[in-house]
Image (spheres, helix red, strand yellow):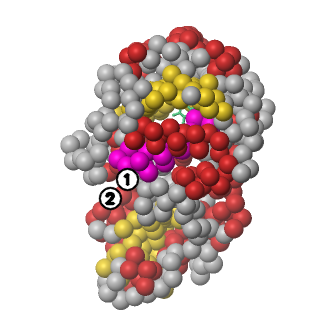
Amino acid sequence: MNLVVGIGLRSGTPYRELRDLVASALDEAGGGTVRLVVTVVGRETEPGVQRLVASLNAELQTAPAEVLGRQPVPTPSEKVEELAVTLSVAEAGVLLTGAELVVPKRRSAAATVAIGRLPVAGAGPAKASRATTPAPGYAPAEREVVHRVISERRDVRRGFVREPIPDDVLVRVLEAAHRAPSVGLSQPWDFLLVRDVATRRKVHDLASVQRDAFAASLPPDRRQSFDGLKIEAILDTPLNIAVTCDAGRGGRHVLGRHADPRTTWFSVAIAIQNLWLAARAEGLGVGWVSFFEPAEVAAVLNLPAHIELVGYLCIGYVEAFAATPELVRTGWAARRPLAWAVHQEEWGQRGLPGVAPTSILDDAVQARQNAVQTNSQQLVRLIVGGDPAQYLEQPEALVVHMHSEKPAADFGVLWRPARTPVEAVELGVELARDLALQGVGEFDIQIVERSELADAMARGLRVGASACGVTTVE
Ligand SMILES: Cc1cc2nc3c(=O)[nH]c(=O)nc-3n(C[C@H](O)[C@H](O)[C@H](O)COP(=O)(O)O)c2cc1C
């Protein structure tokens, strides 16, 4: 008999108490194999629960308090509400899995336990549910909230109000970050809360230096637009958070990291996104500042040498959240359509699910018919082939390197190793579209190393430009 154990508990309940309570309930159930332990979201990190689950060799599942609270149970108890927010966590947890309740709730000093029998004999919980219907998603109104917070999250740098962030709010936001997925469950992040004004001034100074350096690297018209942008709110917010990465966390054999160490940093970035979303739901604006040499910030913050900065966040309550990104509102950049980013089966077959995929060239030829000329004066000089060193001094130059070997990294050199003329045309169209999204209004195309591939790239650039209302000169 496959069993599920539902547990409600007070924070800090010792393992021994849980073990004894579960053992007595299992006795009453008359034996069986515990496949699953269910508790309320938030209690899964309790050491007692983790040890119990390990000793039973079972799977641990959680359910949100609201969901458990909606589950009718045979033995409701108001006392449990104090323990774990919902009426019977133990019985509701069991019943939510589709199990039949075989031992109703029993309690110890700080915990409650109920036992259920899983529906399919001989199968674990995952198999049982897969054999029937898929697990339900959220109700439409709940789903709507998830999508709302995703679309209404903004990078905020202006309009902060002088109001402190209560500790309980901040803890909720940090808990969301800390619940992020991570490679091998290595949880490589830490959150350094920085409130001290003197420290923040030093960090602000570092950002100012980088701001000036970036401004100096821009062509004059782009620089003018950049001067009107605010890129940080380090001193305008009550709190800064440095989110860091410990690349060695978890030791040698972290599951899933061995082949791709980047996954450690990805995990930290996901934690930041969780934080960002949870903050938005609390009405807190967050601005991510990356105008830094990370090591310089690490030095100001006196981080240990093995700890790296991933994100520096400025957080506070705001007057309002804009409906669109500031870079869109100011015309600095535009959003890329989703259909450009989705490929079906083969790279280059673009289109949304349910729509026949098209090649980027066909798409651009079609788009030319309705293209509106952009009024941007921003010029990019596209140098196809040639020695980058000759051009990198010019801020408006972008050298397109089409050979198969990767060039030395430099944002002034774009590696587009086309294998065939068709691919070169497509890469040209894509480049044109990408640059138009970054506010470019004019291309000056110069083919320095003539070849069939270079000509094809230039053709693609011209088609892409006319599809986006960008002027070309050659
Ligand atoms: C990794 C990362 C670094 C960023 N660095 C900065 C920054 O230094 N300054 C800034 O003003 N915005 C920064 N942003 C915010 C982006 O400009 C912003 O996310 C983008 O324009 C989209 O706007 P939205 O976040 O409001 O949707 C950063 C965002 C990310 C994800």
Circle 1 residue: 47
Q: Is the residue 357 above or below the residue 373 in the image?
A: below
- Report the Cα–Cα distance between label 2 and label 1: 6 Å
In the drawing, does residue 38 fall left or right of residue 435? left
Q: Is the residue 138 above or below the residue 28 in the image?
A: above
Q: Is residue 45 visible?
A: yes
The quarter of the picture where the C terminus appears is top right
2 and 1 marks in contact (CB < 8 Å): yes
Ligand 1 neighbours mark 1 (CB distance < 8 Å): no
Q: Nearer the viewer, residue 364 or 213?
A: 364
- The residue shown at (29%, 68%) is 57
The quarter of the picture where the N terminus appears is bottom left
Circle 2 residue: 51
- The residue shown at (44%, 17%) is 391
Q: Is the residue 34 above or below the residue 85 in the image?
A: below
Give the x, y percent position of residue 353.
56, 66
Residue range corresponding to the magenta coloring: 418-439
